[in-house]
Image: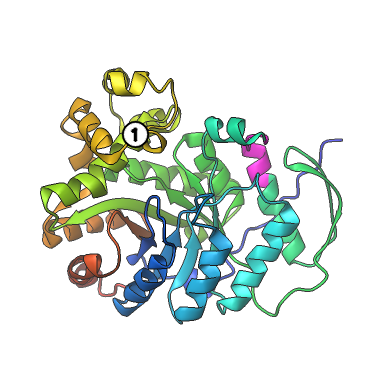
Amino acid sequence: MQAESHPREAVISNHQLRRTAGGLGCYVLPGGVDDPREGLAQARAAERLGLDAVWIGERYDSKDLPSLAGAIGQITSRVRIGAAVTHTGLRHPMVLASMGQTLQSLTGGRFVLGFGRSASWRWDSYGVPAPTLRSLADTADILRRLWAGETVSYDGPAGSYPGLRLPRRPDVAPPPLLLAAVGPRTLEVAGASYDGVILHPFLTVDGVRESVRRVREVAARAGRDPDAVRCVATVVVAPDASPPEEDLAVRARAAGYFSVPGLGDALVRANGWEAADLARYRDQPALTALGGLPADKHLGRPELIALCAGMPDHWIPASAALGDADDCARRLADYTAAGADELILHGMVGEQVAALSARYSAVWGGSTGALR
């Protein structure tokens, strides 16, 4: 039998998520890594620089989310530690609920749990059902009910669970739940069912503005406080970067993202770009040979960078923060002015973002009276 929905107000439970617009965070261990211990030094540097959060993009090799978040939580004391992102399909709801409340307790209320849909190739390869919009909404509800002490009986698109219950719950508020989104329907799930949204890299300022508008409009229609839904924009940055550094931080990433069927199409639509330009980009021999598989998982960085020559010239400058620290800071301020409550800096880590963080504080803080 299909489960009944359980509409309820999704309250942001972590007081640190309620910040004045302008907060900055950064990824640790961006991309693939062999030694996850490097992320600990990057997290310490981010805290020392005064950033508000560090974010983990889980990969199923050497970037296990709970291992990294637990370790980072013990060597930092202030920064929030966010998953941006993990997935619902590979961990049972009981495991997700236990992981979330345990990390929230270990970090003193600093953990943020972000989910994403990923792409069909992953779920086909792993042999598990692909998440649906309904299953994502229902998973958020299941977790909240477990964290509230309820016994959950559920049979629906998120699975079949006769009786779920957490025997013990720590004396700390449960972690906020965020949903990564690009397309309009996923943005609507975020607005209706989650505490916030994580917007994908390589959205333009206008793309972020429209995404934020849609999320908050849906939240209001659902009877929620639209201003309580946290909108987090991810911006690929390369401040004061040499051409080779900019290629690795920005162009190799862009080549991978736009190659992915579904994701690249959603980014192009969200940015108001021409679908024909995306088709021409994907018609390059190196991509057609992959048959739709993600380029960043099968091509080396030099090959990814070379693919960018097939992109329209305006794509990357319009959807990333490039130039010197002042140029990048102004672009970040544009994203914040477009409605983003918080920014995740992607592409450079630790001390590499020191000058940018300082300049952004001056640009944004100077224009609004307060950065935090």
Which quadrant of the figure has residue 10?
A: bottom right
User: What's the residue at 43%, 68% (across, down)?
Assistant: 37
Which quadrant of the figure has residue 205?
A: top left
Residue range corresponding to the magenta coloring: 128-137
The amino acid type, in three-letter code, at marker 1 is: Leu
Residue 30, relative to residue 277: is it above or below? Answer: below
Quadrant where the N terminus sits is: top right
Which quadrant of the figure has residue 349?
A: bottom left
- Residue 3 location, x and y as percent? 81, 41
> Can residue 189 be spotted in the picture?
yes
- Residue 242 location, x and y as percent? 11, 53
Residue 325, relative to residue 154: is it above or below? Answer: below
Residue corresponding to mark 1: 299
Query: Is-magenta flag for residue 329?
Result: no
Front one among 365 and 306: 306
Position of residue 214 in the picture relative to residue 168 (left or right): left
> Can residue 372 be spotted in the picture?
no
Front one among 169 and 243: 243
